[in-house]
Image: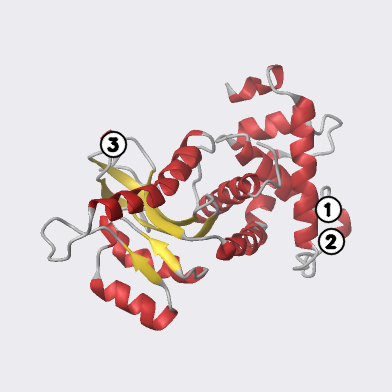
Amino acid sequence: MQEHFHFTTDRAKIQKQYAAIFVFVSAQLSCIQVHLHRRNRHLVKQEDAVIIAIHLLGKLLGFTSERAWHRFVTGNLFTNGSFLERSRYNRRCRALGFAIKWIRHELAKRGQHHAYVVVDSLPLPLCHTARMHRVKQFQEMADIGYCASKKQWYYGLKLHLQVTDQGLPMGYVVTEASCHDRVAAETVMTQIPHPYNFGDKGYISQTLRKKLYEEHRVAFWTPVRNNQRIRQSDAWKQWMKRKRKVVETVFSILVDSYRITKIRANSVSGFETALDGILLAYSLVVLGLVER
């Protein structure tokens, strides 16, 4: 259906979204001078800010196919033939991946002023369960893991994400599917440290809590298991459950609206660029910089 969006989409709204993203990206790129080492810059058909803005707009609209998105752009936004051909556009996006990552990281720092953050993980399957024992995609970094919420095994990766109480993504780490949440917890929470962190029972570890507080001054709270000696009141459990609910809402939006579990990439750089683009597009909406 994505190939036929031009029959049903409000072009005026898309132009408004593109303009808002372009203005923001242009202001950010002026701070990092991404053009310094490019040869033949005078021959560039489209500026870097245009390429990044188009990439983010595609993620905002939920496109998973780069072919369908390029067809949509040339048919609705650049109808005069001034846009890049598809393969060159994809190469430019991957080359600008570091700029997208830097912009997202700078935007995520605003979350340090929010009340608290929640850490959780999201499975990113790369194929259907029936093919997971013979798939060859991303063999150097993906493997088979277990999703406890869906009670099923899957082949792919796992996204460990830190989200503020207002839904703004901050630090994140992508690991193999079999990686336990505790292993990646310290890396996620120390990328952009926040003094107050919450997690679920998968992060229970006295050693981890002590290390986070002593080395990084990060307080980390988790529920307790039934077989632990520590007892928590029902009111405390319900309070923590309400605090941690925000990350489940964010994951639901990222999966349903931004198709974060449907990334079609054959290279690590392509996957990383798509993931950073999705998180940046969502962050712009959360902060009210772009209208969804």
Q: Quarter of the image for the C terminus: give it.
A: top right
- Which residue does the numbered mark 3 point to in the structure image? 129
Tell me which numbered mark, 3 or 2, is placed earlier along the sequence.
2
- Circle 1 Cα neighbour tier, 10 Å, few/some/many (<14 / 14–19 / ≥20): few
- Which residue does the numbered mark 2 point to in the structure image? 40
Q: Is residue 145 left or right of residue 280?
A: left
**Disc 3 to disc 1, how far (Cα)?**
43 Å
Tell me which numbered mark, 3 or 1, is placed earlier along the sequence.
1
Q: Identify the residue shown where x is 63% and y is 62%.
A: 98
Quadrant of residue 200 within the rendered picture: bottom left
In this view, the residue farthest toward the bottom is 214
Q: Nearer the viewer, residue 203 or 68?
A: 203
For mark 1, give the secondary structure.
loop
Q: Nearer the viewer, residue 237 or 119?
A: 237
Q: Identify the residue shown where x is 64% and y is 44%.
A: 285
Q: Mark number for residue 44?
A: 1
Specify the amino acid type for callout 1: Val
Specify the amino acid type for callout 2: Asn
Please provide percent x and percent y for residue 237. 28, 52
Q: Is residue 119 left or right of residue 47?
A: left
Q: Are marks 2 and 1 in contact (CB under 8 Å)?
A: yes
Q: Identify the residue shown where x is 42% and y is 69%.
A: 187
